[in-house]
Image (cartoon, rainbow, N blue to C red):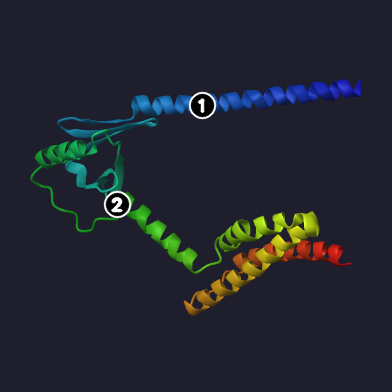
Amino acid sequence: MTGALVALDEMALATWINVVIMVVIALVVVFVVMWVVRAGTTLTADHLRLDDAFGSRSVPWASIEAIAADAGIAVLVDGTWLIVNSAPDRHTQVRTIAAWWTARRGAAWRPPATVPPTPAQVTVQRRLETEAAHQHSLHRWWVTPAMITGILAAPISLAMAEAIGLRGAVAVVGSVFVVLGSVVVVAKIVSIVRAGVTVRAVELMRALIVLGAIAGVTYTLWSVLTF
């Protein structure tokens, strides 16, 4: 009786999980449809109207301070860039919006004293800052050791598995990774220190934990083989 109740509970749980998944999928589909149907840009005599899935906003031409068309189209309003939904022919869209804005912004328009970075420029700047930060950190330190171990050490050790056994092959792979990983970590720490950057304790701790865990397993395997 208890087993039957457990089975029913498991069936009910599975049913609810399926219902939740279907609801999530339906919501995503509805959102995508709304975005496709509503998203657009409308040019009128007085306003530039921006529509998206959440609503619309009308911006008077006289309120637009500047137009940017680098990676995307954006208009500067009150010191904030507003993203314009791009059309298939983006170049024609940029020329059209710029022409309408130039003709309708009014004689009182003056170039803004300061223009904040465009969304595309902010994205590029953040990416460059992230890359620069990663160059002087232990971020993804394990990639190079893992690639070298996987490309060189793993095939060789597996080919020798008949002679040294599967445990021996795993121990060889672990030893190579630990040695290479230790060299990479030390080299990165030296590079970080020379750059005048402080080594992040969290990243160093993570690297030591990973190397320590793999070294411990490898030592255990070698101990079993040796003794």
Query: Helix, strand or loop at disc 2?
Result: loop
Q: Position of residue 210 (x, y in %)?
A: 68, 62
Image quadrant occupied by the N terminus: top right
Q: Nearer the viewer, residue 118 or 91?
A: 91
Estimate the x, y position of residue 215 in percent, counting from the top left.
74, 65
Q: In the rendered view, tell whether residue 105 sits above or below residue 164.
A: above
Which corner quadrant of the image does residue 179 belong to? Answer: bottom right
Tell how many labels: 2
Residue occupied by mark 1: 27
Residue 18: image location, x then y, percent: 65, 24
Hey, which residue is sitting farthest right in the picture?
1
Badge 2 vs badge 1, beta-carbon distance below 8 Å: no
- Residue type marked 2: Thr
Looking at the picture, how far across and down is residue 87, in whole percent?
A: 27, 33
Q: Which mark is residue 118?
A: 2
Report the side of 20 relative to 42 (left or right).
Answer: right
User: Residue 21 is drawn in which quadrant?
Assistant: top right
Q: Earlier in the sequence, mark 2 or mark 1?
A: 1
